[in-house]
Amino acid sequence: MAEWETFSIYGEKWSEHLQSILDIFPDALCHLNAEEKVVLLNSSFSEILGKPGSELLGRKIEELGFPKEVTGAFLKMRDSAQETRSPAFREFFLKVPGDAVHLFEAVIVPRLDKDGSIRSYLMMIRDITELRRVKIPILEEETLAPSWKVPLDALFICDMEGRLLYGNSAFERICNLSVPHFLYQRFSALVHPEDQAKASALFKEALEGGAVNEELRLLPPGEENTWLNVTLVPLSCASGGLMGVQGRAADITEKKRALEQLEKSLGTLKRSMRETVQAMAAIVEARDPYTAGHQGRVSRLATAIAEELGFPEERKEQVRLAGLVHDLGKISIPSEILTKPARLNEMEMALVRLHPEVAYRILKEIELLSPIGEMVLQHHERLDGSGYPSGLKQDQLSLEGRILAVADVVEAMSSYRPYRPALGINKALEEINENKGRLYDPAAVEACTRIFQEGRFRFD
């Protein structure tokens, strides 16, 4: 107390006796002048800030380490109209001596002159950490779930600036840090550099209201990343204002590794599927040298039409594969019929018309290829039901099957066949447009015509 024996407020001398009276109050008290500089304080106020009174006197409120919830209240009070200058109540987090963060309530009362201008301020601060534990369960692990019942996720609290104020034992384990080492650090500083922008955006979104969720990587304590599923929600004070955010983080590292392994295995299966389709296509073309390359060209055109129609990548890939094996069923047709340099008779044509069904039966037995079996089965069907093998019409046909039908006709007419010369692309486009809506799907015809006319596709 010797250091506070006398000091001046507006030219008056305050005795040690008066200081002793102020120190009786258990709550922290502070008197600030109109410039928001400390001119009087009690020992509780000094203890909260962890500095002797001599270092606090004459300092402005924003120099004392208070968060913006408090400094903003002074600013709002100063800039508001005279009739709206009323006491302000604020809750805020503050780091106290001993590497702990406590929750405080501040009451700020403006003292006005006769003309309504602010003469000074009185501020009282009260530690309400224990009082609010029941209202903020995240501060008390056992209020959420006893450790022997439910394994706790990592729980943490950040202030308005994103600085960590609290983390439970699970949070310490995940971060591989003890409380003193992460306290008052920004949460984003614990995150992998490539995810820090995402973490900052997540925090900002949480402050704007509502729960937000994201997967983030921590700075690796070892050689491998630690993945967290992080959920943030706004943390409000009793008066309704925001104090920061509270978060929950679950370690999903093992889940991510399993997913990566699954994706790798799926990639291997997809490669095997593509290789199988290529092998099947090669078998068909080896038996029919006159139409070598037909399936590949149909596949390219069908894929281009699908892209023009806005198909997503996975669906486009299925169309591409279906095009590559749409004539797979021709392996059941004798070579002399496939290469016959004249039109086929009725019996021969009946045999040829079985090839979509044969292809379908082969593909449906291969689990990875079964989705494209239906497309292949429909590539000779027509909208009016005049196609084969089933005479399907309109909505009975998939869009993929309709696309294959258009691509097959255009390629076949524009290319050489043993029984006739090539008719050319113009004749092929004329055919599909004349029968658009009757035999061929209008959207597929228009897309096909457009990419040829605009020079965005051509057969090699």
Image (tube, rainbow, N blue to C red):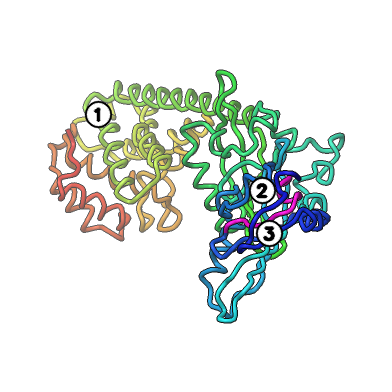
Whether the residues at callouts 3 and 1 have beta carbons within 8 Å, the answer is no
Above-or-below relation of 45 to 96: below
Nearer mark to the viewer, of 3 and 1: 3
- Where is residue 141 shown, x and y percent of the image? 80, 41
Q: Earlier in the sequence, mark 2 or mark 1?
A: 2
Disc number at residue 246?
Answer: 2
Identify which residue is drawn at 39% across, 37% down.
317
Identify which residue is drawn at 16% across, 34% down.
416
Q: Which amino acid does label 3 sit on?
A: Lys
Q: Residue at label 1?
A: 293
- Where is residue 251 shown, x and y percent of the image? 66, 33
Q: Which amino acid does label 2 sit on?
A: Gln
Q: Residue at label 3?
A: 13
Question: Is 248 covered by the magenta stretch?
Answer: no
On screen, residue 295 versus residue 328, left or right, reads: left
Q: Number of marks in the image? A: 3
Nearer mark to the viewer, of 2 and 3: 3
Magenta-drawn segment: 37-48
Q: Distance between the residues labelled 2 and 3?
A: 47 Å
